[in-house]
Amino acid sequence: MYERITEINGHAAAIYDCVVAKDMVYSASADHYIVRWWISNGKQDQFAVKFEQTVYSIDIYENYLFAGLANGDLHIFDLKENKEIKFYQQHTKGIFSIQHNVKNKQLYVGDADGNLSIWDLNSLELLIYLPLDCGKIRSIDVSSDGDYFAISGQDGYVRIFETTYFNEIHSFFAHENGATAVLFHPTKKDELFSGGKDALLKQWNWKKEIELKSIVAHMFSIYGIIAQKNGRQIVTCSRDKNIKIWRTEDLTFLQKIEAKTKGHRHSVNSISKIGEDSFVSCSDDKRMFVFQLKAGGL
């Protein structure tokens, strides 16, 4: 079983995103701050940045920190120099998802209107801007080989793009009222998982655009999906305040983490992998929790 081993408390408002880098976790909050914390003890580090707007999404690539704001601003920081080095106003609505591609040195940014921008991580310049008209892009994931990325749209569709010319090569309707989370299968290249506002967790063969499995996973929207245990488990988090653990092979339910088992009291907005046996979560309850798998558990 996963157990909470650390509580991180210090924000004055909801935490919308969290991302792990080495021994630290960065948090993005409605209190307009990005803050860095030590994973080991939950204490705040010296790095903290305040903005004029709520921070919806963050990502880290090497020494760069990317921050997406509620008004569409994209800020880029050099963590070695401890200063902002780029600022873009390419987007005009809230940025809800940022994801980097290590292999192709690209950054993908999605906003509330369904616009997608793609950036070169070497030059930090815009490569292409795609107005997809798909509603809020809440989740982006990159395939393990770096050749594809997937996005979840408010229109209910999951879209797959290739990363050379950025053509949309697959698109399929996945969830009523909106797709909210997407994850490429950790071991099967042709498959992925999606979550939606319909609270369903689905498994797909994305190359054939065929639904393989669908389960009622939560009570409300699924906001995040990550892989653990070298791909043998996936973890989901939801607006229903719960975190759930599933066996990847057959989506068998393994564990629920809720308030009475030292989970969150409000919507769980994001989860981020620390190691194969540990992850961190963030919530509207203004807190982050670090969970560790007990020896011999699950």
Image: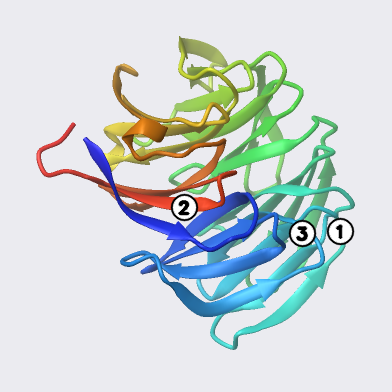
| 138 over 76 or under it: above or below | above
- Marks 1 and 2 sit apart, C-alpha to C-alpha, by 31 Å
Check disc 3 and report its element: helix, strand or loop: strand
| 29 over 45 or under it: above or below | above
The residue tagged 1 is: 90
Q: Is residue 123 left or right of residue 65?
A: right
Looking at marks 1 and 2 on the same chain, the residue that comes earlier in the sequence is marked by 1
The residue tagged 3 is: 127
The tag on residue 126 is: none
Three-letter amino acid code at disc 1? Gln
The tag on residue 288 is: 2
Q: Which of the pair 142/282 is nearer the observer?
A: 282
Q: Residues within 10 Å of mark 2 (few under 14, many from 20)?
A: many
Three-letter amino acid code at disc 3? Leu
Which residue: 56% across, 58% down?
104
Three-letter amino acid code at disc 2? Met
Q: Is residue 93 left or right of residue 204?
A: right
Q: Is residue 93 left or right of residue 98?
A: right
Check disc 1 and report its element: helix, strand or loop: loop
- Marks 1 and 3 sit apart, C-alpha to C-alpha, by 12 Å
Q: Tell me, yes or no, if residue 247 can be seen here.
A: no
Which residue: 58% across, 56% down?
100
